[in-house]
C-alpha cells in the first residue's frame, strides 16, 4: 500500500469545515491501496495524528518518514491550503499534491484578481471595482459604476465569510468595513447578477482530461448563498439541476473552460449565475471545494455514478500519481 498525507484544518474561519472535509476523505479512501496520515494545520504548527494522538511535525520530518509518502491530498479550505502557501512549500520540497500549483491557487483565491483574469480572456463576469486596504473611496462613484443592489466581498475568503449584499447606498460603508475586517487584501464590489445560481464540479476523467460533474442548482430564501445557507441547512440544492440538456451542457462547458484557464488540477468547483443557456456569468472558482457530508461535490459525484471512494482514488491517480 502507498502512504499518503491528508492535510486538514488551516488558520482561517474555514478550518472547521476543512476538518469535516478531511474526515470524509479519511473515511472513504481506499485502504486496500492507500495508507493515509492526517496532518492538522493550526496556528501552532503541523501535527500528525497517529492512533488518535497528535505529534508535532513539519515538512522535513514528513519527507524523512520511513512511510515514504507518495504525496499530499490537500483538504485545507482557506489559508494556507487554498491560497497557494501550502502548495508553495510542498512544491519547493518536491512533494506532489492534489491541487493546482501555488501560483494558480494564489490567483483563484483572490476574487479581484480572478475576476480581472477571466475578464481579460473574454469570459463573462460581473462588473467589479477593487478597494485596497486604506484606500479612499466614494459611495456615489461606486454605485454609479456598479449599480444597486451589489455585492461587497473580501478579496480573500471562502464560505461566503464577510460577504454582504447591499440594497441601499447608506449600507455600503458598513458592508465595506465588514469585508475589510476579513484578511488584509482589500475588497471587491461587484454588480448584481440576476438569474438562477448553479455550480458544477470539475474533475479529471480516467485519462486525465477535465470533465464536469452534474450541475447543481442552489436555491435559498436568504439574500444569497451565505455561510448560514451553506452550513445551517438554509438552502435547497437540486442535483442534477432540473433544466434542459442544452442548459446543463453550456454550464458544464463554462465550468471546464474556467478550470482550464485558471490552471486548476484535481477537484475544483465553478459557481455560476444564469438566466438561460446563452446567458451565463461566472461567480467564483472553488479550488479546494467542500467535501463534507453536507457538501455539493459528493452529491454531484453520486449523481454521475462515482462513489466517494472512486472519486478520491481518481483525484489521487490523476494528480499525485500522474
Image (cartoon, rainbow, N blue to C red):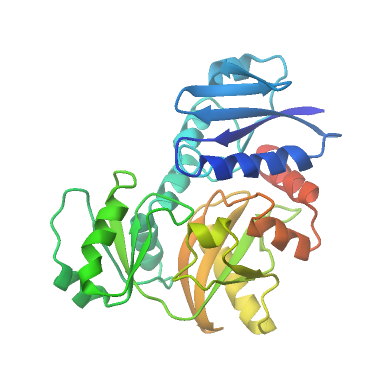
Q: Is residue 305 above or below residue 157?
A: below
> Which residue is at the front of the view, 296 or 127?
296
> Which residue is at the front of the view, 94 or 243?
243
Q: Position of residue 80 (x, y in %)?
A: 46, 37
Q: Is residue 136 left or right of residue 304?
A: left
| The N terminus - image quarter | top right
Q: Position of residue 251 (x, y in %)?
A: 58, 74
Q: Is residue 47 visible?
A: yes
> Which residue is at the front of the view, 319 or 217?
217
Q: Is residue 236 left or right of residue 227?
A: right
Q: Is residue 73 left or right of residue 308?
A: left
Q: Residue at x 60, y 61 (%)?
A: 233
| The C terminus - image quarter | top right
Q: Is residue 46 left or right of residue 33?
A: left
How many labels were placed on the picture? 0
Q: Can you name the residue that lies furthest to the right here?
A: 32
Q: Is residue 322 visible?
A: no
Q: Residue at x 71, y 61 (%)?
A: 299
Amino acid at each position: 500500500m502507498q502512504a499518503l498525507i491528508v492535510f486538514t484544518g488551516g488558520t482561517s474561519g474555514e478550518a472547521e469545515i476543512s476538518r469535516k472535509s478531511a474526515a470524509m476523505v479519511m473515511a472513504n479512501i481506499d485502504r486496500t491501496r492507500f495508507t493515509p496520515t492526517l496532518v492538522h494545520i493550526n496556528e501552532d504548527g503541523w501535527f500528525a495524528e497517529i492512533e488518535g494522538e497528535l505529534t508535532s511535525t513539519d515538512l522535513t520530518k514528513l519527507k524523512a518518514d520511513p512511510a515514504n509518502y507518495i504525496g499530499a491530498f490537500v483538504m485545507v479550505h482557506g489559508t494556507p491550503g487554498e491560497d497557494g502557501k501550502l502548495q508553495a512549500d510542498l512544491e519547493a520540497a518536491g512533494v506532489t499534491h492534489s491541487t493546482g500549483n501555488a501560483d494558480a491557487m494564489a490567483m483563484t483565491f483572490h476574487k479581484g484578481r480572478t475576476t480581472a483574469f477571466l475578464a481579460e480572456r473574454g469570459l463573462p463576469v460581473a462588473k467589479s471595482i477593487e478597494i485596497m486596504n486604506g484606500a479612499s473611496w466614494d459611495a456615489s462613484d461606486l454605485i454609479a459604476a456598479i449599480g444597486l443592489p451589489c455585492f461587497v466581498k473580501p478579496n480573500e475568503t471562502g464560505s461566503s465569510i464577510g460577504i454582504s449584499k447591499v440594497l441601499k447606498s447608506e449600507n455600503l460603508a458598513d458592508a465595506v468595513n465588514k469585508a475589510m475586517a476579513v484578511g488584509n487584501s482589500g475588497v471587491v464590489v461587484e454588480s448584481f447578477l440576476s438569474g438562477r445560481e448553479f455550480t458544477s464540479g470539475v474533475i479529471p476523467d480516467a485519462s486525465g482530461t477535465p470533465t464536469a460533474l452534474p450541475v447543481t442548482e442552489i436555491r435559498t430564501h436568504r439574500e444569497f448563498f451565505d455561510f448560514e445557507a451553506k452550513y445551517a441547512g438554509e438552502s435547497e440544492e437540486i442535483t442534477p439541476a432540473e433544466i434542459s440538456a442544452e442548459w446543463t451542457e453550456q454550464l458544464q462547458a463554462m465550468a471546464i473552460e474556467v478550470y482550464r484557464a485558471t490552471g486548476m488540477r484535481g477537484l475544483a468547483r465553478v459557481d455560476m449565475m444564469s438566466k438561460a443557456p446563452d446567458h451565463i456569468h461566472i461567480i467564483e472558482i472553488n479550488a479546494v471545494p467542500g467535501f463534507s457530508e453536507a457538501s455539493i461535490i459528493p452529491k454531484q459525484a453520486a449523481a454521475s455514478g462515482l462513489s466517494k471512494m472512486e472519486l478520491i482514488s481518481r483525484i489521487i491517480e490523476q494528480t499525485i500519481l500522474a
